[in-house]
Amino acid sequence: MKSLGKYASSVTKARKGTASVQTTIPIAVAKALNLKAGDRIEWDIRAKEDRRYALVARISKRRQQGFPLMPKSLKDPYS
């Protein structure tokens, strides 16, 4: 797989009382993935030895209908 560049962004808490965090996607990454405001993305987390990788892809409009939501039973690990 060919690298198209490395980009960095910060992770912040999304909202008080939620079990999620958020990050800003650099514009170069958004353009490379053809992302627009309001699009949904899918995270595929992989492990190789002691490293973790996240593969990110835009979800097509057709697949967005069945997008799973995080169960309410999960506690906020960042509170």
Image (cartoon, grey):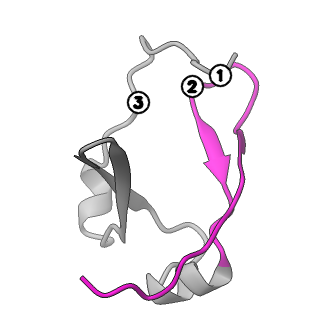
Horizontal and vertical percent for residue 44? Answer: 29, 53
Horizontal and vertical percent for residue 9? Answer: 68, 62
Residue under circle 1? 78
The secondary element bearing badge 1 is classed as loop
Q: Residue 70 got which mark? A: 3
Q: Residue at x 29, y 55 (%)?
A: 65
The secondary element bearing badge 3 is classed as loop
Against 64, residue 74 (above or below) is above
Q: Residue at x 72, y 54 (%)?
A: 10
Contact? badges 2 and 3 (CB < 8 Å): yes
Horizontal and vertical percent for residue 49? Answer: 24, 44
**What whole-number distance in Å separates the C-alpha atoms at marks 1 and 2?**
7 Å
Against 27, residue 23 (above or below) is above
Residue under circle 2? 19
Residue stretch in magenta: 1-26
**Looking at the picture, which amino acid does disc 3 mark?**
Met
**Looking at the picture, which amino acid does disc 2 mark?**
Ala
